[in-house]
Image: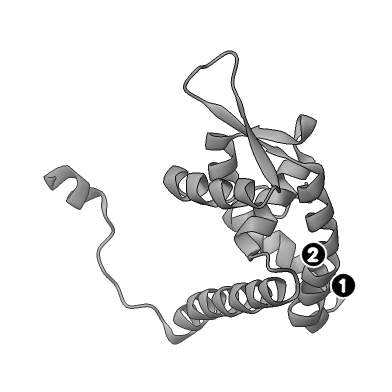
Amino acid sequence: MAQAHLLQEPAVQLSATELGAWRGLLRVHSALVKQLDAELASAHKLPLSSYEVLLNLESAPGRKRRMAELADSVLLSRSGMTRLVDRLEKDGLVLRDGCTDDGRGSYAVLTEKGAEALEEARRTHLGGVRRKFLSQFEEHELRVLAGYWDRVIPGASGLQ
């Protein structure tokens, strides 16, 4: 325990500019996620977390992904992913498939009904992203913004 404490930086107050940048990021992210989630739920009865799972499965080879990988890719705990996939499976949007090479693991597989639900929700979601976020910036500002994300986490923007 003592070693972990020594590795931490001393507590120093953030400047007003630093605090504004940090709080702004958190507030904008939180507000946008809530708004986009509400739009999808209202229009398609599909929460944003479910949309992200379906989108992730759509882009996976064979439209399937190991549950553990899926949880990591959409930033959910494994138990949270299990509950979410249970709901999606109940709605016929995904199905589970066992791993032949590992009896403990399983795959989530996008069904045709899931692909159709994703396609229907895509226009609503992307329209919301454009209206609520992207339209606030010029093209060159979006490139700069993507560069900032990559500075914090290399590859975060996916443009490289």
Q: As shown in the figure, which amino acid type bears the numbered disc 1?
A: Glu
As helix, strand or loop, the secondary structure at mark 2 comes to helix
What residue is rendered at 28% in x and 59% in y?
9
Q: Residues within 10 Å of mark 1 (few under 14, many from 20)?
A: few
Residue sitting farthest toward the left: 2
Q: Where does the image place residue 92, in percent across and percent down from the top left?
A: 69, 47
Q: Where does the image place residue 105, in percent across and percent down from the top left?
A: 51, 25
Q: As shown in the figure, which amino acid type bears the numbered disc 2?
A: Ala
- Which is more toward the observer, 128 or 42? 42
Residue sitting farthest toward the top: 101
- Residue that label 2 marks: 121
- Residue that label 1 marks: 139
What residue is rendered at 29% in x and 72% in y?
12
Q: Residues within 10 Å of mark 2 (few under 14, many from 20)?
A: many
> From this viewpoint, is residue 62 visible?
yes
What residue is rendered at 58% in x and 73% in y?
29
Q: Which one is in front in this view, the residue at disc 2 or the one at disc 1? A: 2
Question: Going from the N terminus, do you reach mark 2 or mark 1 first?
Answer: 2
Q: Where does the image place residue 121, in percent across and percent down from the top left?
A: 79, 64
- Which is more toward the observer, 33 or 136? 33
Q: Where does the image place residue 1, in percent across and percent down from the top left?
A: 13, 45
Residue 38 higher or lower than 85, as above or below: below
> From this viewpoint, is residue 75 visible?
no
Q: Are marks 2 and 1 in contact (CB under 8 Å)?
A: no
- Which is more toward the observer, 1 or 109? 109
Q: CA distance from mark 2 to mark 1?
A: 25 Å
As helix, strand or loop, the secondary structure at mark 1 comes to helix
